[in-house]
């Protein structure tokens, strides 16, 4: 019995020492990156942020994080962060290899902008916006879900089962918005992301996805120059690279969503969309 007691005390001491070491190493890492001048790219999912971030990286010769890949199947971090059960510094330290890069692109971090700027006070932030109708359509294309259903069950759609973080994208309540069907949830999510820019637009550079499509090379150069990034590498042969499965963009959006879902997007998003110059109808 005495030997068992000694072993238990040794294990407790080991856990305490291990935690102290973890806390010390995390503190040192966070202090180091706090001093760095990161470029943070925000915005909703499927706004072209992956291709834009990667092209900026290649044009400027800077390293880039294209999503926190290790967290794609761990949606609980979003809920813990939202409800104050976890500190963003813990999430960043767990994925320190990715957060150690110069350019940070992770759409989910958009909703924790206030926490981000505390950790990265020297960072420059950019926000990518896209017409809400096309943004929502593109997300549903990515998930292989039609836009004209009354509602859906997550278990009926393999993409939602294979990547649990997408389930949260179809739930607007955790972001503080009303409950709705899957299309309404995506409309509220678009508004939640848009609000981050609208409330902080004096601190964030805005890039319209549609502007990028009209002249990709020039838009990337303008983006880099604004943020003080050198134009190092030629990317003209890369601008049309398809980074993710292409959505069906040449579709009648009225037919894609159906009257009810289309009207709901209009009702939810129209006011904020107009503040970005979008006239959806």
Image (cartoon, rainbow, N blue to C red):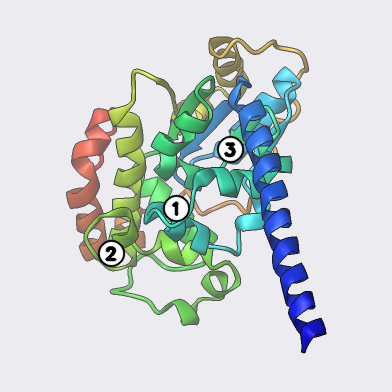
Q: Earlier in the sequence, mark 3 or mark 2?
A: 3
x%, y% of residue 32? 66, 27
Q: Quadrant of residue 239?
A: top right
Q: Which residue is mark 2?
A: 258
Q: Residue at x 58, y 16 (%)?
A: 218
Front-most of residues 87 and 265: 87
| Residue labelled with disc 1 | 81
Vertical side of 217 occupied by 84: above or below: below
Q: Position of residue 178 (x, y in %)?
A: 21, 60
Number of the front mark, 3 or 2: 3
Q: Which residue is mark 3?
A: 105
- Determine contact: label 3, label 2, CB under 8 Å: no
Secondary structure found at label 2:
helix
The answer to which of marks 2 and 1 sits earlier in the sequence is 1
User: How many labels sit on residues?
Assistant: 3
Q: Quadrant of the image for the N terminus?
A: bottom right
Mark 3 neighbour density, 10 Å: few (under 14) some (14–19) many (20 or more): many
């Amino acid at each position: 019995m005495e030997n068992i007691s000694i072993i238990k005390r040794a294990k407790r001491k080991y856990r305490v020492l291990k935690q102290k070491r973890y806390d010390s190493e995390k503190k040192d890492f966070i202090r180091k990156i706090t001093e760095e001048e990161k470029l943070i790219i925000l915005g909703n999912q499927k706004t072209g942020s992956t291709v834009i971030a990667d092209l900026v990286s290649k044009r400027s010769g800077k390293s880039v994080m294209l999503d926190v890949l290790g967290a794609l199947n761990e949606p609980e971090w979003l809920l813990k962060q939202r409800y104050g059960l976890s500190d963003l510094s813990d999430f960043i330290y767990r994925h320190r290899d990715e957060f150690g890069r110069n350019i940070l692109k992770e759409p989910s971090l958009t909703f924790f902008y206030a926490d981000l700027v505390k950790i990265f006070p020297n960072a420059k932030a950019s926000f990518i916006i896209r017409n809400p109708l096309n943004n929502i359509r593109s997300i549903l294309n990515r998930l292989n879900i039609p836009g004209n259903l009354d509602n859906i069950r997550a278990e009926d759609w393999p993409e939602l089962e294979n990547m649990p973080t997408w389930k949260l994208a179809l739930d607007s309540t955790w972001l503080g918005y009303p409950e709705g069907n899957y299309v309404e949830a995506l409309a509220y999510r678009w508004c939640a992301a848009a609000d981050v820019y609208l409330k902080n637009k004096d601190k964030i550079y805005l890039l319209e996805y549609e502007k990028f499509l009209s002249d990709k090379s020039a838009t990337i150069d303008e983006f880099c120059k604004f943020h003080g990034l050198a134009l190092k590498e030629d990317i003209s042969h890369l601008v049309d690279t398809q980074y993710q499965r292409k959505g069906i963009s040449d579709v009648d959006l009225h037919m894609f969503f159906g009257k009810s879902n289309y009207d709901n997007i209009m009702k939810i998003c129209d006011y904020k969309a107009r503040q970005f110059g979008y006239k959806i109808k």
